[in-house]
Each structure stands twice: as C-alpha cells, then as structure tokens.
C-alpha cells in the first residue's frame, strides 16, 4: 500500500525550449515565468533526458518526475518496470512562425537507427489559433520518394502538402510516417510518445541562431515517410478524442460542483485548458489553472470542481 504522500496528486514544473519559431504566449497568458524571450515549448510532463519535468507541489517538490517514478513505481501502475521512464510526454507548444516540415519514425526504425530511442506517435489539441491559422498534415495527393526528394531540395515541397485550417478544440492524430508541420499562430497541447526524434524535410529557408540553415535529415525522412494522400486525421468535441496503443486522451468540461473520478489502475496526467479548477484527494487539495499540469498517481481517488476544461491523459503501461 502506498503512503498518502506518495499517492497524492501534485503539480509539475516543465522543462523549457527556446526554438527559433517560438512565441511569447506561454509566458504572457499562461504565467510560466520562464526567462526566455522566445518560449517555443514547455515539456509539462516528461521523463525524457532531453527535458525533465519536476514536481512543483507537495512533499516531493523539486524532485524530477523521473526520479520520483523510479523510487515509487506503484504510482505509475502495479505492472510498471520501475525505471523512471514514462512512455508518454506532454508538451505545450506556441508557434509564432511555421515549424519545419517534418516526420517521425516508428518504434522499429528508431530502435535500429537512433540508439534504441522510441518512435513517435502524437496527437495535437488546439487551444488557441489566430484567424486564418493552419497546419500541415500529410500529402495532398499520392506521391513517391523521388518526387519528394526533388521538391525538398528545390524548395517546392509545400506544393505537395495538405494544409488544414484550424480552430480551438480541433484534435489531430499524427501517426509515424505522416509529414506534418504546426503553422504560425497556434497554441496547442501535444501528447506523444516519450521520444525526441524528428526528421526535417524542409524549413522555409530559415536559419538557426548561429546564422546557418538548420539541419535537414532528408534520407532518414524519406525512409520513413508515408507517401500516400492524407486521410482525415482531425476530430473535435468532448469525451475521448484519441485512443491509441500508447495513450488515451479525454477532453472534459469540469462542473462547478465537485465530481469524482475514482481510483485508476494507472497514473493520469491532467492539463488545464480553461478556467480555474480545484483537485481534491485524501492527500492533497489545490487549485490549478489553464496551462498547468497535474500528475495523479495510480490508485488515487480524486475529484475536480470549477468551471473549466481539461485534458485527461491515460498512459498505457506495457
């Protein structure tokens, strides 16, 4: 039986990334208070060594989430291996300009070519979108390796891509092999496999902070691309919006009065999307707001109240 201090929900503090396309919304409107002029991503719930999140409330405040899970494996699930590695990574992303056109490998390719790293399956939940904002998700028509290679090299790749307008509440599921790019003017939550493998095909002629064009990974990208025309990837609304082999994500409107969520067999990750919400359990009670991330250990009976909206993410533990 876990002690109450181990099974109580807690806030997380993110790792921050200042990529060249980042904006200021995460500091301006979500009070991240991170001293970066360009805050592109916050890795809200992460045990990946490239960006570890830390516990920000309760008796384990200051501890990395990875170390906590290693020491308290029962907070993930009864079957958890106890190595501190969570298979899911949750980010907030603010795109002031277009991200690179990119693709991610599956587990098999990544294991062979990226030193045992995972592949990357992901979903996007659009929180805010400027008027006219759009993103890229797949090819507009069937194509092939040679055509894509030439288009990437001569700068005509955007003509092959499917651009989709977006609005708040839209959800996109991105399978490995799908060419994609988040467009300018979008704030979203990304739920993904815990991986940091990205292959860039095209970067809009942009240069990095060193003044040089950012690296492309054309051969590896061509190895893993799905060259077929894009299928419909998007959905919207409340309830379960994504249920894949890695995670499930529910969009939940929280009521003004408390509603219970019961004991779960695995941990849950909550991301505040709108409003002020109170979480209560036997071991903890606190408020969280839009942009905050809460980790709920397995075996925790808890309730939420306050008029708002959350994403509740259920990692699937092997």
Image: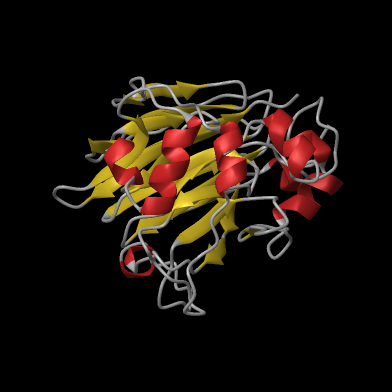
Query: Can you give x and y, in whole percent of width and height, for residue 143 in the image?
Result: 40, 27
| The C terminus - image quarter | top right
Which residue is at a point 29% across and 25% down the rendered structure image?
237
The one of 129 and 1 positioned closer to us in this rendering:
129
* Residue nearest the viewer, comparing 231 with 75: 231
Image quadrant for the N terminus? top right
Report the front residue among 110 and 254: 110
Give coordinates of residue 180: x percent, y percent: 41, 40
| Quarter occupied by residue 308 | top left
Is residue 34 shown to the viewer in this render?
yes
Q: Is residue 199 above or below residue 40?
A: above
* 240 left or right of 4 in image: left
Image check: 36 left or right of 27?
right
Residue placed at 59% from the left, 33% from the top? 224
- Report which quarter residue 300 is drawn in: top right
Q: Is residue 269 visible?
A: no
């Amino acid at each position: 039986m876990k002690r109450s201090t181990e099974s109580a929900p807690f806030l997380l503090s993110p790792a921050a990334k200042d990529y060249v396309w980042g904006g200021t919304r995460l500091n301006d409107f979500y009070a991240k208070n991170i001293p970066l002029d360009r805050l592109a991503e916050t890795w809200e719930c992460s045990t990946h060594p490239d960006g570890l999140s830390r516990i920000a409330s309760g008796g384990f405040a200051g501890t990395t989430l990875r170390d906590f899970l290693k020491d308290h494996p029962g907070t993930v699930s009864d079957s958890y291996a106890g190595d501190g590695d969570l298979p899911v990574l949750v980010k907030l992303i603010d795109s002031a300009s277009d991200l690179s056109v990119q693709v991610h490998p599956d587990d098999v390719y990544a294991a062979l070519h990226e030193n045992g790293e995972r592949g990357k399956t992901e979903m996007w939940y659009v929180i805010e979108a400027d008027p006219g904002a759009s993103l890229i998700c797949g090819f507009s028509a069937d194509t092939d390796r040679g055509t894509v290679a030439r288009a990437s090299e001569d700068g005509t790749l955007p003509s092959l891509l499917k651009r989709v307008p977006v609005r708040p509440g839209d959800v996109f599921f991105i399978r490995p092999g799908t060419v994609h790019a988040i467009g300018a003017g979008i704030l979203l939550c990304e739920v993904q496999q815990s991986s940091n493998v990205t292959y860039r095909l095209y970067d809009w002629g942009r240069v990095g902070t060193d003044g040089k064009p950012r690296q492309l990974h054309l051969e590896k990208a061509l190895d893993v691309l799905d060259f077929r025309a894009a299928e419909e990837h998007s959905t919207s609304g409340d309830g379960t919006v994504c249920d894949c082999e890695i995670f499930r994500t529910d969009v939940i409107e929280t009521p003004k009065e408390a509603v219970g969520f019961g004991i779960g067999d695995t941990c849950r990750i909550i991301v505040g999307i709108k409003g002020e919400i109170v979480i209560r359990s036997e071991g903890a009670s606190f408020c969280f707001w839009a942009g905050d991330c809460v980790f709920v250990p397995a075996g925790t009976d808890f309730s939420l109240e306050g008029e708002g909206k959350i994403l509740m993410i259920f990692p699937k533990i092997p």
